[in-house]
Each structure stands twice: as structure tokens, then as C-alpha cells.
Amino acid sequence: MSRELRVTEDPATEVAERLTETAVAGGQIVLTGGSSPERAYELAAGHDADWSAATVWFSDERCVPPEHPDSNFGMADRALLSQLSAGPSVVRMEGEAGPDAGAGGYEAEIHARVGADPRWNLLLLGMGPDGHVASLFPGKPELEERSRLATGVPLAGMEPQVPRITLTFPAIGSAREAVMLITGESKAAMVARVFGPEPDTSLPAAQVELRYGRLTVLLDEAAASKL
């Protein structure tokens, strides 16, 4: 697998630049939720580039309405999408439909728009303190899903304890380029477990593999402090 681990002083700025470049080129972009990417989204919004040729997707969603504080779409919309003068086409996960119906609807949208092997131009991921990515949690059955592109997650592995919708490893692995953005000292111990000399391959973040492109793991100095 092609993977690069890089420590940088300000990873959010690099992610914002990659987002902007991919959007201007009319790419298929997958956004993620969580705390780490929000600043990157705000920085990208500050560029106010023309995103009108791009399509934005989501890696996962909580099963709440889009205006709910826990909505990944809501965060991305406030920080980025609604701030753009020329915004992209947005395909959000309908969390309010519930995990099964929401996942089924999203998978149908993927098939209709980009096919069964969606080669996203840029896919963003974070990593939770338990090593989860998207809403693929350690020890949960969704880790083993190989026939679907999106699946429901009835039981989340951490707060907020609401059902989720998530892209599966086959969908994530089809990206041409993926960036895993990890920041903060609270993630340092898990970074060492996942990316250290003896990685714990049971953890979801260690299982991300791209079939067609490169995964770049971007760390700030705090997140990398125990490597």
C-alpha cells in the first residue's frame, strides 16, 4: 500500500489547500466530521474558490436531522459549504431516515452518480481516540462489511451514542487520494498504536488501504509526540 506519514506544523492549512485545488478541478470530494477537520473547512471557505463543478459527499453521519448540533453535514455546512459564493453539488447522508434506510439511500446515490467503484478524487478522514475512522468502530461488525459501499451502524462505539451511517472499507479504499488528518495530544497514544513500529492491525485506522492511490496521514506535532 502507498502510505505517507507526515508531521507538519499546520496540517489544517495543507488540507484546506488540497480541498480547494480538488474543488476547482471539479473533483468528487468526501468530507468527514469530527473536531480535527473543522478548522481546515474554515480555512478552505476563506479562499472562496469556485466549487461549482465539484461534488461533495460524506464519509459518515449521525442519525440526527441536518440542523442538529451533532450532524456532520451541519458542521461542514456552517464551516464551509454555506460560506462559498459558488458552492458544490452536495450529496448528504440522510441521517434522519435512520441507519438502514439512510445507508441504503446513500449507496443508491453513489451507484447512480459515480458507479460501483467510486474513485473519489479526495477523501478526508479523521481518527477517533479509540482508533475509529468514519463510523467504523473497533470490534463492530461493520468493519467486516465488504459487499456494500455504505452501511448502517445501529450501535456507535463512542459518544454521541446515536446510530450512524458510514462508508465501508471498500468505498473508502476506492479513493484516488485520501488524507487522514489527526491533531492534538489526546490522539498521540493511539497514533503510536496505529502507526508505530508494531501497528495494532485490529484498529480501524490501521486497516485503511487504497486500491488506486495514496493515503497521506497528516499529524501535528502534538499528535505525533509518542511516535
Image: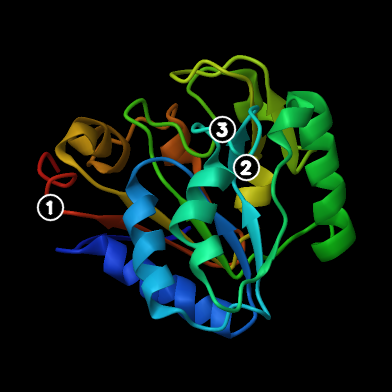
In the displayed structure, does residue 114 sit left or right of residue 90?
A: right
Label 3 belongs to which residue? Answer: 68
Closer to the camera: disc 2 or disc 3?
3
Q: CA distance from mark 2 to mark 1?
A: 28 Å
Amino acid at dot 3: His
Q: CA distance from mark 2 to mark 3?
A: 27 Å
Earlier sequence position, callout 2 versus callout 3: 3
Closer to the camera: disc 2 or disc 1?
1
Q: Residues within 10 Å of mark 3 (few under 14, many from 20)?
A: some
Earlier sequence position, callout 2 versus callout 1: 2
In the displayed structure, does residue 145 sit left or right of residue 160?
A: right
Can residue 89 be seen in this snapshot? yes
Residue 169 badge: 2
Earlier sequence position, callout 3 versus callout 1: 3
Say whether marks 2 and 1 touch (CB < 8 Å): no
Q: Residues within 10 Å of mark 1 (few under 14, many from 20)?
A: some
In depth, the one of 56 and 111 nearer the eye is 56
**Considering the numbered disc 3 on the image, is that residue within a helix, a strand or a loop?**
loop
